Image: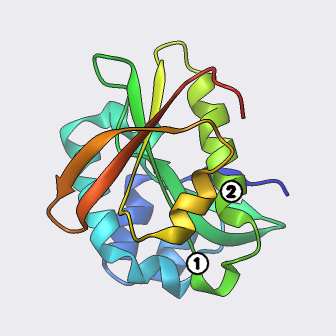
Amino acid sequence: MVITFVPLPLAAMRALIDGDVATASAAAGVALTQWMVDEKWLWEIRAEQIEQDPAAAEWVARAAVADGRVVGHGGFHGPPDDEGRVEVGYSVDPAYRRRGFAKAMLAELIRRAEGDPRVRVVRASIRPDNTASLATIAGFGFEAVGEQWDAEDGLEIVYERGATGSR
């Protein structure tokens, strides 16, 4: 399964925030879905992030496309930090879940991270009860390195892998 990540420019994110899927699709160059509009909370965060740091645009917001259809979105929480760490973030449209898209998206995000010499570590933060996400990262070389508290998700286990680790 091949996933292609299509960048979501700021104009596409603003249109998604406004609920205008047609304008968002035109700006992105790919047919987006109502589910992408429903992820408004994320586009608000990412648009603000890009406005504050335009270099974040190449890292944070992309539509995940498989077989010509948008099946989700993915990216990183930001550019590599001072320690060379990036954190993956991805979600599969409920209409396409349980078909292997999340693993394909994660594999492509890891490939992207490994292609940048600034990246030394790839991170994933997952709630302990999120069995689907825990199953997704299995087999990609992630190891638990600690815990953190997320204001929205509560307790998360922090997993990391070297950017050149085995898949």
Taking the spot 50% from the left edge, 83% from the top edge, the residue there is 35
**Dot 2 amino acid type:** Lys
Alpha-carbon span between mark 1 and mark 2: 14 Å
Residue at mark 2: 103
Q: Which of marks 1 and 2 is in front?
A: 2
Q: Is residue 104 visible?
A: yes
Element on which disc 2 rests: helix
- Residue type, numbered disc 1: Asp
- Residue shown at the point (43%, 80%) measured from the top left: 37
Q: Which of 77 and 10 is in front in this view?
A: 77
Q: How crowded is mark 2: few (under 14 residues within 10 Å), some or many (20 or more)?
A: many
Check disc 1 and report its element: helix, strand or loop: loop
Q: Residues within 10 Å of mark 1 (few under 14, many from 20)?
A: some
Percent of width and height locating residue 14: 33, 66
Q: Any mark on residue 93, and which?
A: 1
Lower position in the chain sequence, tag 1 or tag 2: 1
Residue 151 horizontal side relative to residue 68, left or right: left
